[in-house]
Image (cartoon, grey):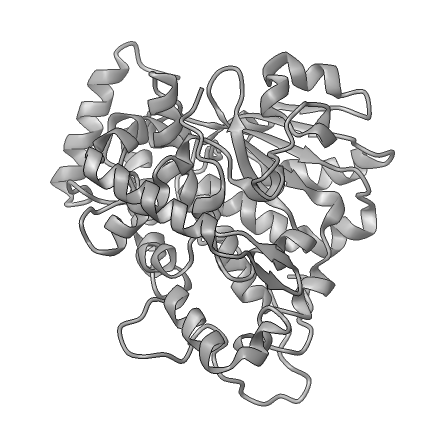
Amino acid sequence: MAPKDKQATVEEFRELLASQDLIREGDTIGTDDETLHRFLRARSYNLKNAATMWKNCLEWRRTVEDRGIDQLYRDIDPFDYPERDLVFESWPLYFHKLDKEGHPINIHHFGRIDLTKLGGKMSLERFWQTVLVNCEALPREVLPAATEAAGKPILGTCVVIDLSGFGIGQFWHMKDFARSSFQVSQDYFPETVARLAIVNAPRGFTAIWNVMKPWIAKETAAKVTIMGSDYKSKLLDFIDADSLPTYLGGACTCDGQGGCKKSNAGPWMHNRRRRRELWLEGRRDTCAIKPGELGQEQVSEDAALREEDERAPAEETEAGTHTPPTQRKELSGSTSETSSVETSSPTTPSFSVHEDGDSHPDPHKLDGPPGLSQEKSVDHVYEQHPETRQVQGGALHKEAPVQVVAH
């Protein structure tokens, strides 16, 4: 039950965290009142339980994938990484504009999930890392940008899951990934779902939902709306037509930006290239530098970079045309946890080893001059070994298909 004076409880929570050296100014977990509110709500405003959740989250952020979420976010730009086109062929998930209340829209196409195809061209471990940085993008960049655009605190996202073409066989193949994603979201990014709409639910979805529901906190499950093929008018009740892709019943096509699935359209893209450059240079502790904080000189420089990209020819890959991120139009902006006290470690999806049993090089450690980020290292490998562009991933990733195995 929420206390009568939430702000006083937040201040008390902040003091408790400070007394245990669990909060410091500039921490990328977020030190603002809204972030503290999320952890408190996830633990029903129990200070001790919320502090335990916070502590566990800090440890996860420090150790995840043996490098920590900050380094992972530095190595992989969630809005522009080399395998993004490939991933979108096999598991499309992306942020796209805002709903009527100002929440970022997060769209997933479960019907197009094909982990066998994906695992044949890149390691599923690498794919999991792209999922993690997408989770991190929400509180780090997307929600702050949405908050600034709305002029009020925006604390969660509007999730739309499209199940067209989705079947029970597909579900059993990807369920470990789905379960792990839910757990990471609820344990380490709590209370970030404002609404969850499932559309094009097929016959037999009840069986799938009965399996999924225990993975989701009851507070989040209460926000779920399940619709069949007659969902379009219902989605338009809370999403404007010009913010909803045409294939979901809206009017948006993101022409000239690679289509809605690849446009990244939303206020988080305003001057984003420059903001990320500043963060990578160590100018700020977080990528969430508000667009308004950039001086006019920096904004002009960002515009010049964008014009340079627009003059450059688009780069062709097997997966399709990769458009430079600054060529995309920049828009200025028009999960609850369970009641248990302790947060568990995330259930990392299981992967099979190669049949030959040999020890293979780490597919994530790329060759390149010392000091280069992973993104720069990818560019370096492509320059030195152009044949690796033939298949995105190629020598950079495990070549044999990786199979998901049940726990």
Q: Picture coordinates of residue 160 (x, y %)?
A: 63, 31
Q: Quadrant of residue 379?
A: bottom left
Residue extending farthest to the front is: 311
Residue 89 appears in view: yes
Residue extending farthest to the top is: 4
Q: Quadrant of the N terminus?
A: top left
- 44 to the left or right of 134: left
Residue 79 appears in view: no
Check the image and report above or below for 198 versus 356. above
Q: Picture coordinates of residue 127 (x, y %)?
A: 56, 60
- 214 to the left or right of 339: right
- 17 to the left or right of 128: left
Q: Quadrant of the C terminus?
A: bottom right
Check the image and report above or below for 190 versus 345. above
Q: Picture coordinates of residue 150 (x, y %)?
A: 39, 18
Q: Quadrant of residue 47?
A: top left
| Residue at the (65%, 69%) spot, across then down | 121
Which of these two is toward me, 167 or 143? Answer: 143
| Residue at the (61%, 56%) spot, across then down | 321
Which of these two is toward me, 227 or 145? Answer: 145
| Tag count | 0
Q: Quadrant of residue 11?
A: top left
| Residue at the (47%, 79%) spot, across then down | 362
- 55 to the left or right of 404: left
Residue extending farthest to the right is: 203
| Residue at the (60%, 17%) spot, across then down | 240
Check the image and report above or below for 50 versus 382. above
